[in-house]
Amino acid sequence: MTALVFYVFATILVLSATMVISARNPVHSVLFLILGFFNAAGLFLLAGAEFLAMLLIIVYVGAVAVLFLFVVMMLDIRVSEAREGLQRYAPFGAAVGAVLFAELILAFGHWRIAPAIDAVPHLGQAAGETNTAALGDLIYTHYVLLFQACGLVLLVAMIGAIVLTLRERPTGRRQDIERQHARTVADTLELRRLPLGRSVRELGGFARPTSYSEAAAKGSYDPHAPVLSDESRGE
Amino acid sequence: MNWIIAFPELVLTLCGLVILTVGVVQKKSTNPFAACSMLTIAAFAITGFLVTVSPDGSGYEHVFVNDGFARFMKVLSLIGGALATIMTLSYRGTSGGGRFELPVLILFSTIGTMLMASSDNMMTLFVGLELSSLAIYILCAFDRDSVVSSESGLKYFILGSLASGLLLYGISLTYGYGGTMEYGAIRTVLIQSGGASLGLMLGIVFLIAGLAFKLSAVPFHMWTPDVYQGAPTPVTAYLAGAPKIATFALILRIMAGPFGALAPQWQLLIEMISVLSMVFGSLAAIPQTNIKRLMAYSSIGHMGYALMGLAAATPGGIRGTLVYLTTYLFMNVGVFAGIAAMRRKGHETTDIADLSGLGRTSPGLALMMAIFMFSMLGMPPTAGFFGKLMVFSAAYGAGLYGLLAIGAITSAIGAYYYLRIVKVMYFDASAPAFDTRSPSLAFLSVSMGIVTALFVLVLGPVTSAAQAAASALIG
Amino acid sequence: MHDVIASYFPVLVFGVIAVGIAGAMLGGSLLAGHQKPYAEKTSAYECGFEAFDDARRRFDVRFYLVAILFIIFDLEVAFLFPWAVSLSHVGLFGFLSMLGFLGMLTVGFIYEWCKGALDWD
């Protein structure tokens, strides 16, 4: 029964991996990659690594594949030009792949399970404890330094994403709350006495601000700002 | 748990978080760049002091180790980070003033390098390497309105991720066939089993491949010229210094520690990488016209010479590599400080032809650049000579005469392009003068020039510190 | 191993029923509904990209920034899962280590907030 499930997951995984590299449309490639991730998560489940399987789906499919899709959609990949390169480099790629495959076979020919593997204390799960709880017992105590270093890696990634992509866009029309609260009656209602035939504009205009540039929070709106070249919204 | 052993790293992390917060809560009108840079340099100084007084020991349950070797490498990394941060004070970029995240990212990258130097576990190796590299990928693309900068960041990131993949594959094979991630336990397993299975050897090969990428050793050097040329010059100065030193710390620690018993197996591989790097670094630099690309190829060559010490696989070899890395760090920072000064009307001009006649237009800068060029080619009594001397004598002592001969020949070939720069500076017709150097660049080039020229004065202390580090590693 | 399969069997049943119900809804409307489309009806309303068009077009990098910030906090949550189930075993030390991790990411959050990455415009 387990063998059947394993072969189903493994076959679909290998097939979808092949489709990733041979699909014509890059978006189809990413969708096959997602299918591959799901099957890999199934394989992890079979091996007893529940947390890793769920993490694969939540993080890989839920976030990383989404990022892949963003990049693939943003780039206009000319599939025919990419295929030309394939013809020239295919023998070289095949040679590298063959060497790696031979290494894999050599390496796994020497595989032996250590007889003392069950004696390693923190590898076994206590009875009735789930895989996630067993992992949690270790990460926050035994490997706390690595855990904090991973937090640092995430922080650096956050800084990097903002440093590289965030631009100050003066199209915000953000409200200036303090200015709104500090409004006085004189700011809201203005009575002008106009002689016959004259307009307000001749006599100096209204005192209230009439454009976003004045009323918005400073720096957030500039109607004359040049539109940056990467600011193309979807048509 | 002995958590106090990582106290310098904890202090530096805290400083980084504080500096980041300080920088971001400033009002829009004040640019916190200068303040954050100064605070970062102060944080490096404090951490350097804490590292020198830190006690030996192992902590966090075989994940972290501190010994003389780790202290030496950490101090070198911190010096590299501090010097690069001083260089950023003059950085203008294409969009005006610098942004304060630049010193903060250098600080986080240095934390990664410190973790790498203190690793006692394959996982620490990987996490430290990733932390350091991720910050550098971002730094390379920092000048986001410049196409070459984005190109360099993208290339380094993609190739670096591939190398990390190879490294992880090696780590997983080593874990599978060694049974544990801890260096001490792997060493015990290998000594007891009297040799390595094929799977473990494959793991070591992939490990070396992944680490050789970070070192820009041939044949994993493809990223180096484009990344060095495109990244902002202070970032290139950092990238050519501290991460290479930290990767050397890693590779020395792995090869001397867990895989020390397998030296006959991996020695040939390291020798080949060393030979290829030296030959390629010297030959490919000859037709270059851009000085940053030239420095990239020259640093490939330097890594070849430094690997010679590792190929010798003796304590003397490790000592030679450490001294070489020290001299390399100072030379490199000095050269890049000079390159960063090559600006005309606010634009960076990095062709070698732009250096023409520098001897007449700016004698101070030309003198410093000449000192660095002589040091790079290994002329006595500059620092580079002593580095090469120690590495060559270690190779001689280990009987690697072929390697030694190739090293000597490539040194002679390399002398051509270093001397060509000196000739262009002093004997060619003058090009228009550069903009006045900012004080930080002047300070850096002069101080590094003095250190390089008078290295013979500090040679004794540096060598004995390196000797202590090597014995701490082997013993 | 057989335990694992047996314990995830309800998930399979759930998946099959979900696919079945969704398929029944779509199939039902396909078979039994009146289909009289015209241009006005099938065009996008309120906002959005055109349906049934090539998915590849340039769009603003702000979407990408939101996705990256999501993934970082998603990973933070992923680290919180094992902590939540094992908190009784790891005691005060585990609690403090998670506090340190959360503190670092809170500094990152403050950084994001003050830089304006959380403002869409």
Image (cartoon, rainbow, N blue to C red):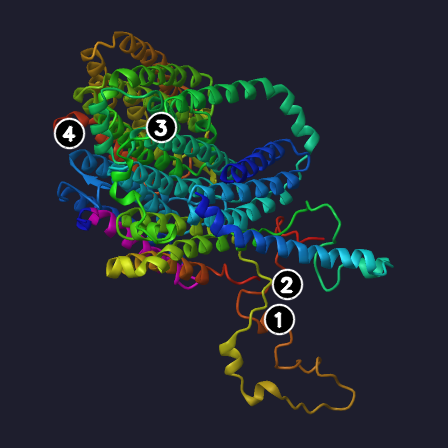
Number of other residues with Cα within 10 Å of mark 3, as a class: few under 14, some 14 to 19, many 20 or more: many
Boundaries of the magenta span: B6-30
Instruction: Specify the principal SS of the magenta part.
Output: helix
Question: Which residue position holds label 3?
Answer: B207
Q: Nearer the viewer, mark 2 or mark 3?
A: 3
Callouts 2 and 3 close, C-beta under 8 Å: no
Question: Which residue position holds label 1?
Answer: A212
Q: Are the residues under badges 1 and 2 in a single subunit?
A: yes
Q: Measure the C-alpha gap from mark 1 to mark 4.
A: 65 Å
The answer to which of marks 1 and 2 sits earlier in the sequence is: 1
Question: Which residue position holds label 2?
Answer: A223
Q: Chain of mark 4?
A: B
Q: Measure the C-alpha gap from mark 3 to mark 4.
A: 35 Å
Against C31, residue B326 (above or below) is above
Question: Which residue position holds label 4?
Answer: B458
Query: Whole-percent x and y of residue B383?
Result: 23, 24
Which amino acid type corresponds to the residue marked 3 in the rendered image?
Leu
Which amino acid type corresponds to the residue marked 4 in the rendered image?
Val
Q: Measure the C-alpha gap from mark 4 to mark 2.
A: 62 Å
| SS type, badge 1 | helix
The reply, left or right, for residue A114 in relation to residue C69 is left
The reply, left or right, for residue A194 in relation to residue A147 is right
Nearer-the-camera pick, C82 or B98: C82
Q: Measure the C-alpha gap from mark 2 to mark 3.
A: 56 Å
The verdict on residue B9 being magenta is yes
- The image quarter containing residue B140 is top left
The reply, left or right, for residue C50 in relation to residue A18 is right
| SS type, badge 3 | helix
Callouts 4 and 2 close, C-beta under 8 Å: no
Observer able to see residue A138: yes
Callouts 1 and 4 close, C-beta under 8 Å: no
